[in-house]
Image: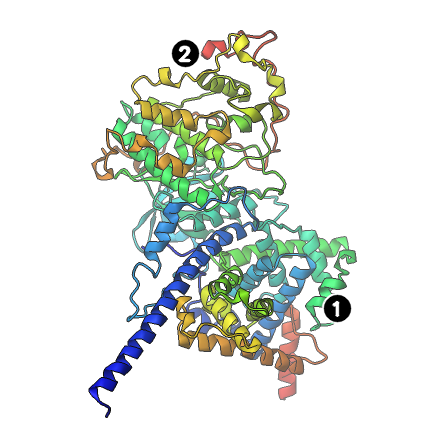
Amino acid sequence: MSSRWADSEADAAEAKRRKKEKEEKKRLKLQKQQAEQEAAVRAAQQAESRPSKRRRLSNDDEEEEGKNGPSSKENESQRKLLRFEAGSWAPCRHTSNFETLNHIEEGSYGWVSRAKDITTGQVVALKKIKMDTHHQDGFPITAMREIAILQRARHTNIVSLHEILTGSASDEVVLVMEFLEHDLKTLQEDMPEPFLASETKTLLRQLTSALSFLHSNFILHRDLKTSNILLSNRGHLKIADFGMARYIPPPHAPPPTQLVVTLWYRAPELLLGTETYSTEIDMWSLGCIFGELLLKSPLLQGKNEVDELALIFALCGVPTDKTWPGFWRLPNSKSLKIPRDPSSSSLKTSSQIRSKFPSLTTEGVSLLSSLLSLNPDRRPSADEVLRHPYFSEAPKPKPMELFPTFPSKAGQERRRRAVSPNAPKRGEAPGMGDVDFSGLFGEGEGVKGSGFQLRVV
Amino acid sequence: MQQPSPLANPLATVAQLRETGSQIDNIPRDLEDSVRFAGAQLTQAAGILLRLPQEVIAQAIIVFARFWLGPEGGSLAEFGARQVSAASIYLTTKLSAYPKSPRSIVNVYAYLDSIPFPSFETDVLRTENKAEEYYVSEGTYQTRKLDLFETEQRILKVLGFQLQVSLPYALCITYLQALDVFSHPRASELAKRATAHLNTALLSPQLMYLTHQPPSLATAAIYLAAKETGIKLPDVEWWEVFDTDREELGFLVVALLSVESFAKEEQKVWQGKKVPMTVEAVEAELKRRHASQD
Ligand SMILES: Nc1ncnc2c1ncn2[C@@H]1O[C@H](COP(=O)(O)OP(=O)(O)OP(=O)(O)O)[C@@H](O)[C@H]1O
Ligand SMILES: [Mg+2]
């Protein structure tokens, strides 16, 4: 045996070697984390394989990954390697494994009901997918997309998809989702008073976190509205209905359909026939929903495309070269007959949001106005919304646990068919080009055109 | 509950690996392996003819492979590998940025059926692409299209709509970057080889993509490529950084190496014959085997 000296020398050398090794591994790990984040982004893009228009990586997401990743729990001696979990696959179970409790809603796309898993007793929501009987392209791509996107979009504020069932008929396909007691539309209709400011804040924040997650994963929802937003009896909000969702199209891909988003939540650029749109259309809808939560009724209830646009301009002002330089290049803008210099006319170019929401704080007005910017480039991203001072000023967002509970219509009885414009139908010809906007501002300048003046409040 | 990583794949369960639908129907295991191997190659070849990016082809091959696993999986007594391969491609491209019409898929598979198998030299396919000029009769097209749609639904059902696939290709390149090899003069050779190994792994009779996660596949491909090119990687257990332990790495490297010998063996076994890619051909092959036993 060697002397104590030699021993500790060897120890020291060994320690030094280990330290070096550790450092080297640490360096590699760091690089690898970066690599993985890039790869994750690429994987998301790979879903429709192409670079996205917006190459944005949410910081929140990076932090999330960091938490689960090896670096924060780093423990060299244990050498615990990260295990990826993504489950397995199994054939679709038959619908007879579930017992229907009551119908919830008959949407334009499917039927939703509350049901119980017979073996586990778990209460779930079932959404039956409507299938065209004569499909030219096999299994409907819209349904495949809804399923594929929901499978990937796992987030605390997005409804979770448990499994897919098939029935005896070959084309019966049913989504099994977690059941939530309310949707925001039906709930608000039954509430005597609007949500409190603190509650609105909590709802808006949850909604925006979901949007931030979706957008950083290159997913557009394209049909945000209160009936597609669910709320549990514990104040937990989740986005549902991914029937219109898509991955962000690549720059040079054929333009996706413009026929998206239910009219009252549809961004002005869509109404004006833009061929390229992105996450900003969801941000517009978010603005409409924010307004709706404050008013307890939909903010911009247009009767048709022209009327919707008139209502938008009445609330937000008409666009000018300064506020929206790209406006005149949009296909339908020419037919509007808005003077290039509206200041010479009696048209209002300023926003009326302040006066429409007298009890909203200055920060609240600032946030709502930015979401309802006519110019899509001026709308904040979901991440920017989350950092807005509105969320930190008083009153503080109300903790979810303190949310009042309401009787659940979905839980008890068949719901009445609600009146609200239907979502755009799938498969309808895209394009709004044939909408005639020419009546909007009448013949001369000014506001004597149809619908416009009447609705200015 | 931990969110599933976007880099992770759903993997086959032990039960799914133990018994397949074909085995329940008494299809010999070696025949099933042969057909699955040929089916993966057929899918790769069709993907090339359809000018699909390798990522989309890889996804189709993985969907194809998933379909046959487990007692509730598809059986060769009920489904031909050709129809499942075609439907896997159809399904995968539909969700991708490269949708293909039933017409072009039917044509490409008819063309591939007309050339002697196995001779899917990928370079040859790329250069001598005659699939475009290949047509089937309207009647044949209508039957094949219906078949395509029906098989598509069956795949969706058997997989429980689990089409999600994450691939190791991009990961492999970023790992190479992390390992700092791109300053090496022969770095591109290393990267090329590693990618080639990932393609090979798609054909693996050991179903590497169905049993191992992308980070481990990328790591094994890099390890083997570095050994072959003699490019030195950091003198530490760098694979652990990429979430792969020594045991898994060893297993995957051996699995990668064995694909080639398996391919050679297959070539010998099927010399001058076609691997049975339809239900009828499988039946005929079984009859032939019984007859030669008597
Ligand atoms: N997971 C769920 N839990 C409880 N209720 C739900 C759930 N999912 C949907 N609902 C209810 O069913 C309604 C319709 O659902 P969904 O929006 O997904 O279907 P849809 O057919 O696409 O609707 P539409 O086309 O009308 O927008 C929702 O507004 C909501 O009231
Ligand atoms: Mg809906």
The amino acid sitting under disc 2 is Val
The answer to which image quadrant residue A297 occupies is top left
Quadrant assignment for the C terminus of chain A = top left
Disc 1 residue type (three-letter): Ile
- On the picture, is B276 further left or further right than A29? right
Q: In the visual, does A222 lie left or right of A134?
A: left
SS under mark 1: loop
Q: Nearer the viewer, mark 1 or mark 2?
A: 2
Question: How many residues crowd around disc 1 within 10 Å: few (fewer than 14), some, or many (20 or more)?
Answer: few
Q: Is residue A125 above or below residue B153?
A: above
Q: Mark 1 highlights which residue?
A: B115
Task: Please state the horizontal and vertical placement of residue A86, each as a whole percent of the image.
Answer: 41, 59
Q: In the visual, does A333 lie left or right of A8? A: right
Which residue is painted at 33% across and 36% down in the image?
Answer: A205
View extreme (right): residue? B133
The residue wearing badge 2 is A457
Callouts 1 and 2 in the same chain: no
Up/down of B122 relative to A120, above or below: below
Residue B211 location (% of width, % of height): 46, 69
Chain bearing tag 2 is A
- The residue sitting at 28% across, 82% down in the picture is A10
Q: Residue A97, can we see it?
A: yes
Instruction: Write down the quadrant of residue B34 in the picture.
Output: bottom right
Q: Chain of mark 1?
A: B
